Structures are given as C-alpha cells and as structure tokens.
Amino acid sequence: VWALAKINETFEVLKGDAIEAYLLLINPHKRGMAIECRSTPIRVVCANTMNFALATDSTRRITVNHNQQWDENYVIEMLGLAKASNAMYIEKAQFLASKFYEDATIESYFSDVFPHSDKQSEEYSKNALRAHEVLAEQPGSNLAEGTWWNAFNAVTWMTDHEMGRNTSTRLNSSWFGLNRTRKERALSSAVEYADAA
C-alpha cells in the first residue's frame, strides 16, 4: 500500500516550470518488511516523478518497523530530511536548467542511460533513439529547450509515461523498480555532463 502526502512546498526551476514536493509512504504489509518514506518531487507540467531516499546511511531510506514503538521525534527528523532532500533536488534542477548540451554529449548521455542490450553494438538502443525524439515532444520541452534539465526530463518522461506494459507496471517500476534506479543514475549523469559543459 502506498500514499502520497503533499508537502506545502512548490518551486519553479524556470518560469512556468513548477515542481511540487511530496512524501511517498510505502507499507508492504509483510512480516520483516518496514514502512518506508521517500521524498518525491513531481514536475507539474508533465507529472514526471523523482524519488530520493531520505537517509544517507547504507540503507538509503527512512524506515519504521511494525514492531517499533511510535517515536514522534524520529518522524519529525524524517520530515526535516525530506525538506533537505527537496532542497538538494531544487539545486540540481536549477543547475541543469542553466547548462546547455551539445549534440555529441546528448547522444552519449542517452546511450549511457539506455544502453544497447548488445554491449558490443555501436548502434543506439531503441530507447536512446526514442529519448532523442522525446526531447522535443515531452510536455514542458519548450520551457528548457537545449538544457540538461530538458534532457533529464526526457528520461523521466519515458520511464514514467512510456516504458512498461501499462500504467500500473510503469508506476511500480518508477517508484520501486528498475526505472527508479535508472532515474537516479540519469540525474547523477546529467549533473556530471552539465558540470563538464
């Protein structure tokens, strides 16, 4: 079972490009598994999501076990970490929006994010080629045209709205599965490419 809790925090990366902050609460209802909380910024113009684990330790998440006693100080700490996580995302988003990509670097970026299944192949994967198309097609592409923010959002658009058999499998993969990991790597990679630009 999952729930989204809206945090009263909205910011604009660029004029007209608003991001709203949410907490994603997950309860697996399985013995031995804990309730988990993540920060989840959502880009309003296209409903692209990004997840951040709130803790910095090796487990990379805030959890509360079913057999633990309720600790309101821990929850307050968790909400503070969510605010810090959102601040980190804002900083990265604004940095990406200020940096422009070149044709060669954007091709490398999409090939890194969506590698070809044949590691020896010099061709671009189907998803890397589609990401190139999504750059101009995705909602909000006109707001940050040519920037690494637009490139990163091409990845989040594809993972949230195109990849997977149906809406349910896409959501599951975006929040809990392979595409969650792909988006985290895509953000880190975009920041590295933008830093080198």
Image (cartoon, rainbow, N blue to C red):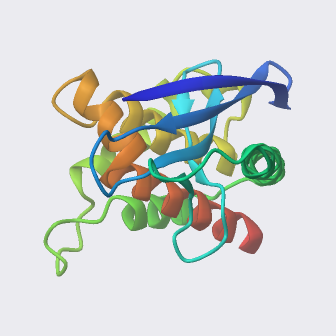
Q: Is residue 85 left or right of residue 137?
A: right
Nearer to me, 191 or 36: 36
Instruction: State how many labels appear.
Output: 0
Quadrant that contains the C terminus: bottom right
> Residue 185: image x %, image y %?
50, 63
Who's the residue at 31% across and 43% down the image?
A: 173
Q: State the residue in front, 74 or 5.
A: 74
Which quadrant: the N terminus?
top left
Asked if one can make out residue 158 in the rendered structure from this viewpoint, the answer is: yes
Q: In the orientation shown, which residue stands out farthest toward the bottom? A: 120
**Residue 151 placed where, x, y %?**
57, 46
Q: Would residue 128 be visible to someone looking at this image?
A: no
Q: Is residue 21 left or right of residue 127?
A: right
State the image coordinates of residue 144 (x, y, percent, origin top left): 72, 34
- In percent of width and height, residue 90 lies at 81, 45
Relative height, residue 149 to residue 44 (above, below): below
Residue at (55%, 21%) from the top-left corner? 46
Determine the residue positioned at 66% across, 63% down.
55
Q: Residue at x 46, y 33 (%)?
A: 157
